[in-house]
Amino acid sequence: MKLVERVTGGTGIGGPLSLVAFVVVLLVVPQMLSDYDLFLATSALIVALMVQGIGMVTGRAGLIVLSQLGFAAVGAYVFLLMRIHLGGAGFLVAIVVAGLATAVVGLLVGLPALRLRGVNLGILTLVFGVTVTVVLTTKGFPGQSKAYFADRPDWLVADKSYFYLCGVVFALTSVAFALLDRTRLGASWLAARRSERATAALGRSVARTKTSAFALCALVAGLSGALFVGQQGTVTVESFAPVTSLIIFAVAIMMGARYPEGALLAGALNIFLPVFFDDLNISQNVPNLLFAAGAVIGLLHGRGAAEDIRHRLGRRFGRTGPELAVASADVAASGNGAGHGLAVRGPLTVGATRSDHAARDVPALEIRNLSMSYRNVRALSDVTVVVPQGCVTAVIGPNGAGKSTLIDCVTGFVRDYEGEVRVLGERIDLMPAHMRARHGIRRSFQQDRTIPELTVERYLRLAMPREASAQTSPEELEDMLAFFDGPHPSRMLASVDVGSRRVVEVVAAVAARPAVVLLDEPAAGLAAAESMRLAEQIAATPARFGPAVLLVEHDMELVQAACTEMTVLDFGEVIAAGEPREVLADTKVAKAYLGQEVMA
Ligand code: ADP
Ligand code: MG
């Protein structure tokens, strides 16, 4: 299947097995329940479907959405419209259209998410939910004033059949979400959750990543709204109270909504626990308080109950799926200096870099007269640096000299600068960060920004353009990692030490075969011997893999061993540039560094 990447995470063999288990339970449950309990179980499935949406936006992309009932109300509305006006068009068609229409609404609600984050985004979605109920309170649902009853077709009249239908919709969305998890989009959701900057640096559009999560979240909520109408026959706005969204969100966080079993448990708990307390004549506030407490525990713990169980099983058996399976054997073999010689294997040939198509005398990267201020701090003044193709150029300078700011400007994370940036002759100043990444600029960050939920190989493939990934075999990636003394490609990034994760970040930037790779202090935290090895590896990178390198570094020895050209920044200005030997002999340079040592 083209959609699915060759190397993926996901549930592996566990997926089909749990699907079979779910189908068996689905068939058995109605035989054991009374009519009333079957009705409740159907409601639980409908809520579970809604919870899967929270698993999408919050569980995967790390955004807060508090408007599930608002989305469900939209779905219910569209479903009723369809049934009243196009009755003959079919019950299932109406459900699907309701879901799709709600997805479009979700896309629109997701647009502000491009600017907002965290609690602010949560409040915005809550406001959306409230707005929907306010509008519906005055307008009412279609057919409400005429007491319209949404009849089910003959084959769905029996409650058992309707229960099966809800189960099938839940299973289908679970499978669809699990398949999406394996795509590049699926990896991008996890990336955006970890760091939006890192996502853009990988060439992925943060906007598309976030809005797609919102649309899918709304889609399943819309489906559940339509199924709810089909179950009840008629609905009022009270069924979609915004406070219910909050309760469902709390249960979802408590149980962990990212996986189907968590969504199912959340749905069941949300429906059955209040009934149980009601039978005991205990106030309805008690289950809600329990949900709130459970959500707090889930938040403190970083994962809900179902996610926790998967995590523990994965650690215990190490084979619940590739995402969780971390072969303990290669933990020992990992880390830097695992014994791969620099020239053990032949150079890689797959994956042309952008430079292959450009004339050799066009610089890989030209930074001309770049100036930038943070409010009243002048971080860069009139900086010019040129990185020829096939070369390693270093930018050095004391702390606060503006080195990271220079990388941020060039890669598009800071855009209100003056001056020009060209990649292989093409001006890129108007492009956002992810477009610059696609146009041949890749970077590493000073702090680790890899995505712990992915394997090393999946992370590298996410970083690579799609075609390059398709052309690169697992062995080639393994060779590349080995060249940089990186961890084995099958390792989960969460289980890799920080030093190796930084190596993986460097490999990812190189593996994308850009015109130029910008490395922000890659040797920070490395021991002297490791740092010298890294210098050799960086020096060999252009000839071996293609990209030119702009190396920002503090470590003088590494810089001298790795680069052929050097630019020195001090207080945002270029104070010297040229060959390392000449530059380091310059008295201004010595003074800049000496000054820092005196201060330190
Ligand atoms: P370097 O990477 O060379 O250590 P930076 O580029 O991080 O230097 O910082 C350059 C200057 O800009 C410093 O004076 C620093 O305090 C300032 N600076 C960096 N980031 C910000 C920011 N986000 N807001 C305001 N000032 C900043
Ligand atoms: Mg810095």
Image (tube, grey):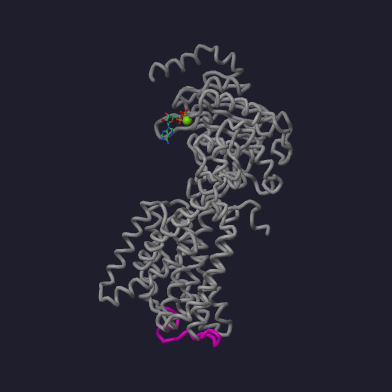
In the rendered structure, does residue 143 fall within the stretch colored magenta?
A: yes
Q: In the rendered image, which quarter contains the N terminus?
A: bottom right
Q: Is residue 359 visible?
A: yes
Image quadrant where residue 137 sits: bottom left
Name the spot of residue 543 as percent of width and height, x first.
70, 29
Q: Is residue 100 visible?
A: no
Residue 250 vertical placement versus 578 (above, below): below
Residue 328 vertical placement versus 599 (above, below): below
In this view of the protein, which residue sits in the foreground, 496 or 369? 496
Name the spot of residue 189 as percent of width and height, x first.
52, 53
In the rendered structure, does residue 238 fall within the stretch colored magenta?
A: no
Q: Which residues are magenta?
A: 141-157
How many marks do you count on the picture? 0
Which quadrant of the frame does ligand 1 lie within? top left
Residue 478 vertical placement versus 288 (above, below): above
Q: Tell me the residue at 34%/63% (across/down).
A: 291
Image quadrant where residue 265 sits: bottom left
Residue 264 vertical placement versus 202 (above, below): below
Q: In the rendered image, which quarter contains the C terminus?
A: top left
Name the spot of residue 146 as percent of width and height, x first.
42, 87
Name the spot of residue 18 as percent of width and height, x first.
54, 65
In this view of the protein, which residue sits in the foreground, 456 or 518? 456
Question: Is 281 placed left or right of 533 in the picture?
Answer: left
Question: Is 246 placed left or right of 512 in the picture?
Answer: left
